[in-house]
Image: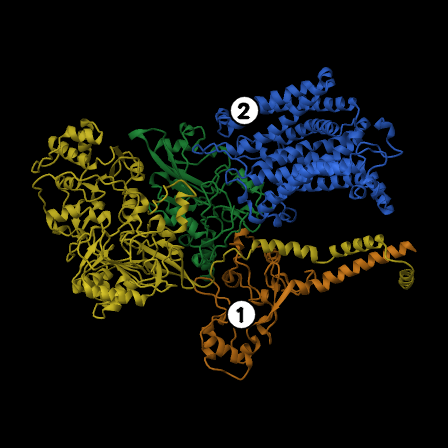
Amino acid sequence: MSKWRNSFVFAFGLAVALLLGWVVFPRVLYSQKHQPLDFLHKTHAEKSGVADCAECHTIREDGTFAGLPAVEKCAGCHSERVGESKAEAILVDSYIKPGHDTPWLAYARQPANVWFSHAIHVKRANLSCTECHSTYGESDRVRVYEVNRISGYSRDIWGHSMSRLRRAPHEGMKMSDCEECHKQRNVEVGCLGCHQ
Amino acid sequence: MWKSVAWDAINEGKAMKVTRRDLLVWGAGAAAGLLATPVPWKVLDDVSIWSQNWPWIPQPTRGPVEVKQSFCTLCPKACGLRVRMANGWAVGVAGSSTHPISRGALCPLAFAAHQLNWHPQRLRNVRHGSSLSTWAEAQSAFAKASKEGPVVVIDGYSGRAASSVLETFAGKQGGSYRVVATPELRAFTPYEQWTGIPAASLGYDFENARTIVSFGAPLLDGWGTPGRLTRLWAESGAGLSDPQLRLIQIDSSLSRTAARAWQWIEIREGSESALASGLAGALLEQNLVPAHSPVPSMTLAESSAQAGLSVERIRELARLVVAKTPALVVARDDDPAIAALNVLLGSLGNRGGIVPHSEGVKPYVAAESAIGNARAVLIDASVPWEFVPQVEAEIFRFAAWDGGATKADWLLPAPGFLEDLTDLPTAPGCSAQTYGVAPALVKATIEVQSAAQFLCSLDASLPTTAKIIDSRCEDLFRRREGNLYGQQIAAIDKVSSVQSFKEQLWKGAVWAGEASLSKAFACHLKEWPAQTRPVSAETWATQWKPVVMPPLASKLYQESGLREPPRRNA
Amino acid sequence: MASTVLTDARWITRGAERISLSRFLLWLSPWAVLLAVGVYAAALCLFYGLNQTNMDNRFAFGLWIFLDLGIIALGAGAFFTGFLVYILKRVELKPILNTAVVVGFICYSGAVAILMIDVGQPLRAWFTFWHPNTHSMLTEVTFCISCYLLVLSLEYIPILLRNRQLRRLPSFLVFEHQLHKLVPVLAAVGTLLSFFHQGSLGGLYGVLRGRPFAFRDGFLIWPSTFFLFILSAIASGPSFLVLIIATVEKVTGRKLVPQELYRRLAFISGVLLAIYVAVKCIDTLVWLNYTSPAAGFAPWQYYQHKGFGTPILFAEIILLGLLPAFLLTFRKTAASKPWLLTAAAMACAGVLLNRFVLTVQTLALPTLPFDDFLQYTPSWQEVASFAGVIAYGVIVYSLSYRYLPLFAAPKGRDSHVSGN
Amino acid sequence: MSARYGMVIDVDRCTGCGACMMACAAENNVPALPQATARTGLTPLLVRKVSNGNNGETRREAFIPIMCMHCEHDTPCVKVCPQQAVEVDEATGIVMQMAQRCLGCRYCMTACPYHARYFNWWDPAWPPGMEKSLNPGVAVRMRGVVEKCNLCHARLHSAKEKAAVAGKREIDPADYVPACVEACSTNAIHFGDLGDANDPVSKEAHSPQAFRLLARLGTEPKLYYKSNEAWVRALAEPNSPQASEVQRG
């Protein structure tokens, strides 16, 4: 029976490794951070009549992208508390009144060596925001921000799926994802087309 | 089947102990399994990404970038700047091509001037002797001193609104106001003595000259407002055998200017004055200039011996100088013998010569290091660090950067690059009057005060720099002369109101008058000036006013051999 | 007593006489110290970066690349002996095969270790496998050397498993027997890989269009240095083995291989060296008269710098090329051990000189008319980490010699070859 | 967008002031480290002093800015890089160096005949606070990688973005001017599209005064020089009489 025994022991080792690698490892690799307050895209879109992403995430005149809005933008409506939620209190008391920018954690932020132009993708290529950011603009909760302990990247860059094999349509923002999309659309750019 | 395997295994587990082989087989299984998990591949990937984003590598700031027009305030040459700003910090400097004098050019150091505010040698605290002190203590010490006796105020950049504050204070206090002038400005003092026209209102009309004879002045190497002469030289046929503008460089070594000049005349070191006298003799002897001039006491032969040039060579040089006129002689400093050559050549007050550009400029009193009777000396941050007063008085020295050991009782941190509002009077050597305003674009990260601010805070009756600038703008507007060089060039008549004029100036536009040749002046020498002592050769670093250089400057002398390393202060 | 307890007799091949463990440790200790210093120097380079070396922007390659190229050439004995034994069936060379494999393994693993220190970003070095530039000679080198190191490891394992203790493990034995059957295949694969990477190491410099001193015309995509490197490596490899075995014999005071084998190796080395010298002469003439002038460089320019004149060319081709080739091939000189060893050393030195000229002189020479001829002295970290590799080699070989039957044929097989 | 960006440098106009070197380093966030020397420093643009070899009054000196020549044919560095960290951009002709891909093997440095490639021997560092003065458009390179002139690609990025906002496909040439070109106080460096026959730079490159350094190597550099002085033009050839007289710059 020693043959069976070997196989069993081998399989046991295999199973332990698979368990560690697929279940434990992802939890260890990413640390979790919480946004400073619960921002609700859905409420802003539905109740406050913010129709266009660009109203807050603006592309400036020189073509650069403002990214997450500065606190003055929020202060436009929230100079005083609007509603009774905890988030409202945090926003007004901790950020708007003292004039500090809200330390948002940007899920989709690329590292400093990447030059991604929203202007070119949105204005020239006419891509919609959901093409890369999925329907996050309609979400009714803030996600936990997960950061890779080794590389320091947001988990959104790799995507939630560890294997990257069965990803949701807009999951992942690695270079290979950019390349794939560029290939599909037959747009060729050199290294420095997207790096700086 | 699986059931039986498991069953057997369990049974055997009961019967058998774990052997070394089991461990090995288990390990092999685990290793095989691990390869089928993301662990090795993801770690490999993440570790390389980590190496691309090492946390200790500095990251540039993020934020909107805007470009502001301003001026370089580090020395009196007043070049126009375009400053790139991000997040309130200056992140890039370039020349402003709309500036009529500097025309988009800058000296090499200006390109990294925005780094100077972070220089390790930045003076960050008020210092009294060797200990730290406070602004309050410095103010009370200065107030006490100025009550007790005369205060000598020393300025390195005359003509600014701040200079006016300093001068007014000195006048009110009963002290005196002295100026440490740049070599470019000092070079005009002989003419001031001969004609009574203040040095600061004279300039060179290079644009109309056809021959420029430079006695060791580094004309192509940071002399005057750098862009003016270099552009002119380049555009008038640099490298051609017969350029439109002939630059004859008389120099004891193959300086940068000599290397690129149309002709280089090699002379012995320090013999510029002697050659000037010899040249005058040769000009007169060959009747190349009108003869109504005093004859130099030095003979051609003596001059030849001193300069190391043959007599024939000097005669040849004389012919060369007048071969293409107007000819203009430029001295490195205030050597009267060289200045007298311009009188001889008739270039004073004439096209392509030395011309006055503004009125109402007061002659300055040059600061000597031996200061007479004084209770205290106040030194503005614009004064070069090399200037060390020799006097038994309490010295209050303003400086943005610490130049090392120099006698000063009080060291007071002054605003750094673009941290202070200042105006920019005409740069020395310009043939037209100019005026610009450089607002404080960057906020200081430490507590700083300029000498003018310091005095204004002590004496509320003094006009502030801002007020003086305001009234100067109004005066200029009222004159209705000249042009405003902003986004476009506009004649001042086209500017609708004084408010708009001021606004444009504050946004970095520069006002420039026109060279007023109508006020031509004559000058006759009674006798040929006596020879002055030779001036030692200047290095490029001494033309730079701040005591420190931006770290990037080491590209020029340390990471390459392009330039000689700066002289260290003792 | 400690002295009686401390023994490794159980691990030593049955019947082999070896010095006492304490004497062996004494022999190892200076090498271990050297290795420790080398590891420290390498750690400095990895931790603080390559500023620990004296390389600079002009001397972007230095001592390390020169010696890497050198030991890889000398390590060619491993694949070439395998090739002779298994492919050309020169079974008389079998007794030195194990030594050849161990020496090859040491040379290649040492070179790869040094290369890992030599690159500025070792953590990203695997990008070469993921995003390879197929036009680069270095890609070819990286792929072939890593594959060949794997092959060498696989060849080394069966030797390792002949250790008295290790062979007791039954599963290991099975593994070893199966691996052993693979060895001829491995030798064939190793030969192919080695031909390519020895060649591409030569190509590394031969393709440098911007360095006319190194640039060579060639055949298809391969510059002539590609072929010259293969030739010089297989010519010097056997000579290096001669030197190693003679040294081991001297150090251990034992006769390990028959004298005839020396002569055999010397002959192979000599003949190949002669061919190499002939090809090198043609190549040099073509380069001097055609390739270099076509790039605008007059050949005299290369040899006008002090210490790097034409004597270096003479030494490379004649003194350390043609001369040892003669000495190694002639029966009379090859029969005399001192002559044989001198000639073998000269042949190895010749190849090292060739690698030196191609790496160091190429970089020292100016290209722009206003460039300097530059010099460079390696820093202690560079020297020490390389000395560490040599110490590592000595230690690995000493351990292999002590615990593995490097020269004795395995029981039952091959005894007719090994002679005694 | 399709261009073949190149330069013509008027050597006669160069005064060797070094403004281009400073502007280049500031624009591209090149660190200046106290330990760096002329052999280990980072000078993607390096002005070198050359002379006609004479002594005394007949001596002439000139200054030659050396940077990546953006070779077009058989680009030596591109060919040798093992992991595609260097490439010639098809749209612009720029030879691009990717620090993030580079493994620091320095093979490209040995391949470059112009010594226009530099290795980051140290980690980049600035005095405390000075990192706030860094150009936001350029990522700082880490130690252990090679860098060189990328033709101020950050400015090309800005120009592209500006064009995109304006709804244009082509950039405005006025928006893309490398820092050295902008900084030159004598307008000695002319930048333009060599592929466009009407571009003044393209015309200048074909003037009899124009030359390229080591053109016979056959790498087709896109950096031209020009001079009215014959001895300067002779520097194009490695066998020029000046070759024996060495000037380090």
How far apart are labels 2 and 1 at the CA level?
66 Å
Quadrant in the rendering for residue D74: top right
Q: Which colour denotes chain D?
A: green
Q: Which residue corresponds to the image point at 24% horizontal and 61% vertical from the top-left?
A: B162
Quadrant in the rendering for residue C7: top right
The quarter of the rendered structure image containing the N terminus of chain C is top right
Provide residue B494's location: percent of width, then percent of height. Answer: 23, 63
Provide residue C15's location: percent of width, then percent of height. Answer: 85, 34
Disc 1 on helix, strand or loop?
A: loop
What numbered label is drawn on residue C250? none
Q: Which residue is mark 2?
A: C288
Q: Which colour denotes chain A?
A: orange
The amino acid pointed to by label 2 is: Leu
Q: Is residue A39 left or right of residue C183?
A: left
Q: Chain coloured blue: which letter?
A: C
Q: Is residue C31 above or below residue B148?
A: above
Q: Which colour denotes chain B?
A: yellow
The amino acid pointed to by label 1 is: Trp
Residue at the far front in the pictured view:
C1
- Give the letter of the chain under mark 1: A
Foreground pick, D121 / B37 = D121
Count of numbered tags: 2
